[in-house]
Amino acid sequence: MQLRPLVHAAGLALAGLLIAGCGSDASSADRATGPGDYQDPNRICPDQDITMFDELFGQLNEPAEDHVGYPGEHEGHDYRECSSRFGRSGSGRGSLFTQVWVYKTVEEARAAYQRSREIVSGPPSVGTVRPTEIESVKRIGDAAVRYREYSGEFEVSTCVMTRSSNLVLSACLRDSTGGPGPGARGPRELEMVAEAVAKYATGELKTLARTGKRF
């Protein structure tokens, strides 16, 4: 089943995601099969750690909310999503969108992740002002990629998608002061955002391994 986008922001589909050139972002040791390590998470928002974004955006200023998708939309696997907003006007605002899919087997999760990688190999999203920047990420789950896409004069979204065992996670940070307009974040600040998203995704995998429930 194709992963459903959580939100479209100026043409950005948050779940069609990611491919890293012609190579593979999967670990060479990724040979697992069977049920996998993860169970359906009861929740995402109450357990998430987003302190790594405080320096860039300020503290959370709107309560995070969990959602489970639409009835019948996620048959055959479990799904949760969480949205968090933080930052104040004048210092930039960020919106963090997290999606989690938990499949019955590692093979199903691997296939779903691969389909999403193939989808993004097409043309850039409609409405973007420069091509998506995509690269493999090591040491996050069994396979991971990150990308950056600009959608307007000041807005940029930095995302990480990772698969760990039978779970697929997408974390996407929409930054209202990202650029490329005047006064936007510079290259080093954009890299700090990317590092924060990667740190968040790594932490979420550990948290979700603890908070799941049986199917």
Image: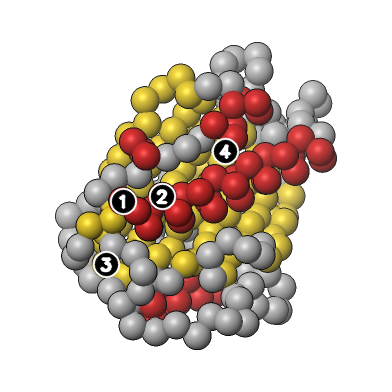
Q: Is residue 32 rendered to the left or right of residue 145?
A: left
- Disc 2 marks a residue whose amino acid type is Thr
- Disc 4 marks a residue whose amino acid type is Arg
Q: Looking at the image, tell me whether mark 2 or mark 4 is earlier in sequence order.
A: 4
Estimate the x, y position of residue 39 in percent, counting from the top left: 28, 62
Query: In the image, what residue occupies the spot 76% across and 35% down?
Result: 189
Q: Say the numbered circle drawn on residue 140.
A: none
Quadrant position of residue 200: top right
Query: In the image, what residue occupies the spot 70% across and 63% down?
Result: 135
For the residues labelled 1 and 2, say whether their Cβ atoms are less than 8 Å apart.
yes
Say which residue label 1 marks: 211
Say which residue label 2 marks: 207
Camera-side residue: 214 or 20? 214
- Disc 1 marks a residue whose amino acid type is Thr
Distance between mark 2 and mark 4 Cα atoms: 22 Å
Which element carries disc 4, helix, strand or loop? strand
Q: Which is more foreground, mark 1 or mark 3?
A: 1
Distance between mark 1 and mark 2 Cα atoms: 6 Å
For the residues labelled 2 and 4, say whether their Cβ atoms are less than 8 Å apart.
no
Distance between mark 1 and mark 4 Cα atoms: 26 Å
Q: Say the numbered circle drawn on residue 77.
A: 3
Q: Which is more foreground, mark 2 or mark 4?
A: 2
